[in-house]
Image (cartoon, helix red, strand yellow):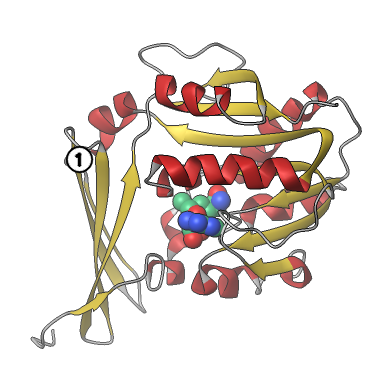
Amino acid sequence: MNMEKPKVSVEEYLWVARFYDRMMKHVNYGAWSKYVMRMFDLARRDIRDVADLSCGTGRHLHHFIKAGFHCLGADISMPMLRVACSRPTVKNRLWQQDARHPAIKENSMDAVIMLFDSVNYLRRENEIRQLFEKVDRILRPGGLFVFDTVTEYMIRLHMTEYFETETWDDLAYERRSAYNAKTRMQYNNFSILRQGQLIRERHSQRIWTHKEMTGFIEKSPLTLLDARADFKKKPVQPRTERIHYILLKPKT
Ligand SMILES: C[S@@+](CC[C@H](N)C(=O)[O-])C[C@H]1O[C@@H](n2cnc3c(N)ncnc32)[C@H](O)[C@@H]1O
């Protein structure tokens, strides 16, 4: 191993993008996408145009396109989008955009999605408010915004002092997670070993409570239709690990 000082990445997903799909190989994106598609029955309009504002490597997007939706994928991370570009189904539908300022035409989408902790990457209250306002603008009346968040219960249970390592032929990584209960910030610290070089990358996520999130929604132009726990139709409870929020842009 090279004993040079490690390279420290200032950008989330700059290096993790290279092995994100391998790290997430246990995730059933097909079933997750179908779970979200079933929520579309709650929309007060037909759903055809769908924007994934944090599509990452395009795995949900792939399933939505396969299911016949007319989709566009956006993400703030160019390295994640580069991986998505290697998927023939999604490669011509990608844009680098920040979900807080999406450059998408007003009233042009029937549904907007942001899945797999993406909203936890918005760490300030004003960023969440901004997101809701922007999503409201791009949705058609009667359209839906579906996103999920991880709960503090899940973080305390699985991710407070979580540790994992993986080694492949081209690289190896170590991931150490930590949680600051005071600030409700959760950190994933990656050490990546690639061609003898050690690279460090840190991801920070804000763990929003259900009460906080419903408070933000109440103050937004969108209406909360449902909040579903743990990939079921059941309501949120103290032991819920992941919440999917289904928001409606009311018809005026
Ligand atoms: C955990 S990944 C999930 C990616 C993808 N949705 C999936 O299910 O695999 C979180 C994603 O959110 C993206 N992200 C974080 N902040 C963002 C922002 N402000 N605008 C757009 N994308 C953002 C990251 O670049 C990353 O691709």
Residue drawn 62% across the image and 15% down it? 233
| Residue 79 visible | yes
User: Which amino acid type corresponds to the residue marked 1 in the rendered image?
Assistant: Tyr
Asked if residue 111 is positioned above or below residue 15 in the image, the reply reads above
Out of 99 and 89, give the one closest to the viewer: 99
Q: Which residue is situated farthest in the right direction here?
A: 46
Per the image, label 1 sits on a secondary structure element best described as strand
Out of 59 and 110, give the one closest to the viewer: 110
Asked if residue 184 is positioned above or below residue 165 in the image, the reply reads above
Residue drawn 30% across the image and 72% down it? 10
The image position of residue 190, as x and y in percent, is 25, 62
Please rate how many residues cluster around mark 1, counting C-alpha atoms within 10 Å: few if below 14, some from 14 to 19, many from 20. many
Residue drawn 53% across the image and 73% down it? 78
Q: Judge left or right: residue 200 versus residue 244.
A: left
- Splitting the image into 4 quarters, where does residue 165 fall? bottom left
What residue is pinned by disc 1? 179
The image position of residue 200, as x and y in percent, is 23, 71
- Splitting the image into 4 quarters, where does residue 171 fall? bottom left
Q: Quadrant of the N terminus?
A: bottom left
